Image (tube, rainbow, N blue to C red):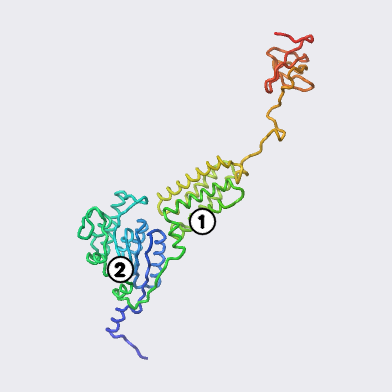
């Protein structure tokens, strides 16, 4: 049996070229949001399971959600595999923060990195507390990889004065490739990934390129803070319109599809679990039971269950509360408009609202017209004190006198009719008594 042992020189050559090594290339593109976070969790886990020797994150993003970037940074910091960021175009705002959490940074000749100020969804600057926390996070990310934290802070703090780097006081720092190399924020400038692999000693390594799945792309869209209130509003509007529509049609289908998309996106993004779905189903069942069990308590519990399931699914409690409030307002406005212009005689309401009327054309009358009795004669069937019963034109009629007492069997004449009130006067000796 023969044994072959590589020479030290040959082994060094093999290691330099990266033969037998495995490199995972993971894109960080478009907006930083929960869908991207779910994608990075999946692909980095896959890289660990496959025993990857290096992960290269190819970054081209204008930034995005700070909370998602924070979770991604935590993910990168906990990786045992060496990481590198290759900024192919831009790594701005949250994108620069992600890059700073990798072991090494490379850039293309036209790439930029920085401009990381925190802004709200309406485009205004975040409050001082949020800005302070973000600046601290940027500094911490730089320090964790042995980079000068001053430049990371300048990316997020416009009060740092760095005129020599093109960022005088009042402007956020944005690094071009040469400046990034100069300040120690980039290891090299390369047009293509092959240059990065060569610099890492992995030119001959096996490269696995990962891509986002359709489900992850869709989840990223569906969990967007702008899309969430739209989905919930469409769901609430659909259910309200369905109440006024006969059968189960397009409005109800739209509502169900909106809810399914909401929970689908949040489940794929890792925000919602089956407990939220079970709570939602329980809420719907309780609301349906409310139509058959009076009291209102079951319905209130159903609404609470649905709201609870939505709150459990949201990444940000404040954003979810705002989204639910928007959907609630839409539902109220829709209900008022539909009730005013459509009424409650269509759709599901027709089964739970009494519409029968005792109308005259059906033989029902609220009272009998007694005006035909005026001037008619009869006799008192009971003593009139002053009310009682008289027989007028062979009909028993409830009557009253003009105030006096009339004994039974006395002859009377109807002298006034006011609605159902019949007034009689006693006839004495065939001659009406005058008072």
Q: Is residue 404 visible?
A: yes
- Image vertical order of residue 194 relative to residue 379, above or below: below
**Residue pushed farthest bottom?**
1
Are there few (<14), some (14-19), or many (20+) residues within 10 Å of tag 2?
A: many
Given contact means CB atoms under 8 Å apart, are the residues at marks 2 and 1 in contact? no
Image mark count: 2
Q: In this rendering, would 328 be left or right of 156?
A: right
**Residue in the foreground of this view, choosing between 48 and 252:** 252
Q: CA distance from mark 2 to mark 1?
A: 42 Å
User: Which quadrant of the structure image shows residue 29?
Assistant: bottom left
Q: In this rendering, would 399 be left or right of 164?
A: right
Counting residues from the start of the chain, the first of labels 2 and 1 encountered is: 2
Relative image position of residue 255 (x, y in whole percent): 53, 52
Of tags 2 and 1, which is closer to the observer?
Answer: 2
User: Which quadrant of the structure image shows residue 351?
Assistant: top right
- Image vertical order of residue 300 relative to residue 381, above or below: below
- Image vertical order of residue 294 relative to residue 214, above or below: above
Quadrant of the image for the N terminus?
bottom left
Q: Which mark is residue 108?
A: 2
Classify mark 2: helix, strand or loop: loop
Classify mark 1: helix, strand or loop: helix
Relative image position of residue 142 (x, y in whole percent): 27, 62
Q: In this rendering, would 353 be left or right of 404?
A: left
Q: Which mark is residue 223?
A: none
**Residue in the foreground of this view, choosing between 370 and 128:** 370
Residue drawn at point x = 35 percent, y = 77 percent = 205
**Residue in the foreground of this view, choosing between 371 and 206:** 371
């Amino acid at each position: 049996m023969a044994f072959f042992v590589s020479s030290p020189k040959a082994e060094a050559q093999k290691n330099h070229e990266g033969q037998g090594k495995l490199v995972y290339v993971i894109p960080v593109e478009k907006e930083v949001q929960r869908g991207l976070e779910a994608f990075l969790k999946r692909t980095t886990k896959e890289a660990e399971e496959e025993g990857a020797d290096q992960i290269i994150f190819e970054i081209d993003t204008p930034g995005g959600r700070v909370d998602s970037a924070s979770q991604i940074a935590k993910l990168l910091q906990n990786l045992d595999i060496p990481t590198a960021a290759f900024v192919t175009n831009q790594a701005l705002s949250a994108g620069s923060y992600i890059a700073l959490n990798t072991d090494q940074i490379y850039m293309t000749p036209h790439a930029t990195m920085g401009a990381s100020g925190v802004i709200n969804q309406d485009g205004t600057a975040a409050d001082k507390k949020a800005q302070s926390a973000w600046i601290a996070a940027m500094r911490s990310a730089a320090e964790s990889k042995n980079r000068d934290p001053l430049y990371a802070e300048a990316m997020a703090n416009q009060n740092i004065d760095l005129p020599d780097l093109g960022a005088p006081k009042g402007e956020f720092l944005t690094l071009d490739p040469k400046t990034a190399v100069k300040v120690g924020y980039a290891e090299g400038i390369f047009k293509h990934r092959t240059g990065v692999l060569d610099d890492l000693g992995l030119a001959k390594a096996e490269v696995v390129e990962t891509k986002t799945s359709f489900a992850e792309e869709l989840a990223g869209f569906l969990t967007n803070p702008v899309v969430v209130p739209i989905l919930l509003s469409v769901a609430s509007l659909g259910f309200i319109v369905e109440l006024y529509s006969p059968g189960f049609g397009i409005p109800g289908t739209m509502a169900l599809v909106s809810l399914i998309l909401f929970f689908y996106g949040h489940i794929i993004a890792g925000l919602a679990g089956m407990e939220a779905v079970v709570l939602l189903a329980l809420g719907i069942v309780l609301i349906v039971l409310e139509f058959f069990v009076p009291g209102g308590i079951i319905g209130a519990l159903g609404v609470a269950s649905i709201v609870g399931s939505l709150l459990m699914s949201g990444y940000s409690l404040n954003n979810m509360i705002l989204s639910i409030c928007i959907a609630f307002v839409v539902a109220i406005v829709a209900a008022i408009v539909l009730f005013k212009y459509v009424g409650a005689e269509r759709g599901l309401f027709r089964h739970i609202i009494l519409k029968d009327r005792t109308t005259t054309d059906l033989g029902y009358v609220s009272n009998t017209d007694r005006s035909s009795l005026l001037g008619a004669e009869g006799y008192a069937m009971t003593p009139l004190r002053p009310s009682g019963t008289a027989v007028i034109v062979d009909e028993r009629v409830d009557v009253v006198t003009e105030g006096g007492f009339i004994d039974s069997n006395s002859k009377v004449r109807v002298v006034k009719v006011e609605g159902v009130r019949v007034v009689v006067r006693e006839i004495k000796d065939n001659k009406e008594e005058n008072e």
